[in-house]
Amino acid sequence: MGEHYLLALATTVVIEVPVVAAVFFRRWGRMAIACAAATSCTHLAMHFVIRPLADSHLVFIVVGEVMATAVEGVVYAFVSRPRDIPRAFIASALANSLSFGFGLL
């Protein structure tokens, strides 16, 4: 893995973990760990599975971001106690939107 990829991964985790922890403030520790793990997995999938298969950069971004938001939302819903499906998907959408927006800068 190149330095550029590792920097992108670290930046994504640093942005998303506090967002998810804040949304689940009463269960912040458990959710921060879940976020770091889920985000790392979806980030790897985006860059090493979806990117090579995508026909264009737009397809890569749309498919990758939708996949990441959905998968991470499912993980947060599964890990949260009590299960809070709406909050899980709000946290995922907010975290992914912020990290995507930062990546555009």
Image: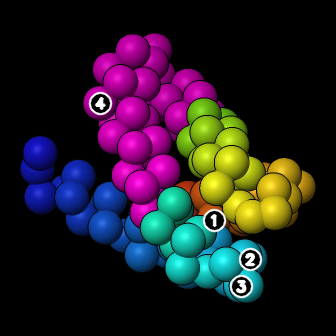
Which residue is labeled 3 in the image? 25
Which residue is labeled 2 in the image? 23
Which residue is labeled 1 in the image? 95
User: In the image, what residue occupies the spot 21% across and 58% down?
Assistant: 6
Question: Going by the picture, which residue comes out furthest to the right?
Answer: 86
Question: Going by the picture, which residue comes out furthest to the front?
Answer: 82
Does residue 105 appear in the picture of this structure? no
The Cα–Cα distance between marks 4 and 1, rounded to whole angstroms, is 21 Å
Residue 16 coordinates in the image, percent (x, y): 53, 69
| 77 falls in the magenta region | no
Residue neighbourhood size for the residue with mark 3, other residues' Cα within 10 Å, grouped as few (<14), some (14–19), many (≥20): few
Q: Earlier in the sequence, mark 2 or mark 1?
A: 2
Q: Secondary structure at mark 4?
A: helix
Q: Is residue 71 left or right of residue 49?
A: right
The structure's colour scheme is rainbow
Name the kind of residue labelled 4 in the image: Phe
Assess whether mark 3 and mark 2 are in contact (beta carbons under 8 angstroms): yes
User: In the image, what residue occupies the spot 31% across and 67% down?
Assistant: 10
Which residue is labeled 4 in the image? 48
Q: Nearer the viewer, mark 3 or mark 4?
A: 3
Name the kind of residue labelled 2 in the image: Val
The Cα–Cα distance between marks 2 and 1, rounded to whole angstroms, is 10 Å
Residue 42 coordinates in the image, percent (x, y): 45, 42
Relative depth, front residue between 73 and 60: 73
Range shown magenta = 36-64
Q: Earlier in the sequence, mark 4 or mark 1?
A: 4
Does residue 22 appear in the picture of this structure? yes
Q: Secondary structure at mark 3?
A: helix
Assess whether mark 1 and mark 2 are in contact (beta carbons under 8 angstroms): yes
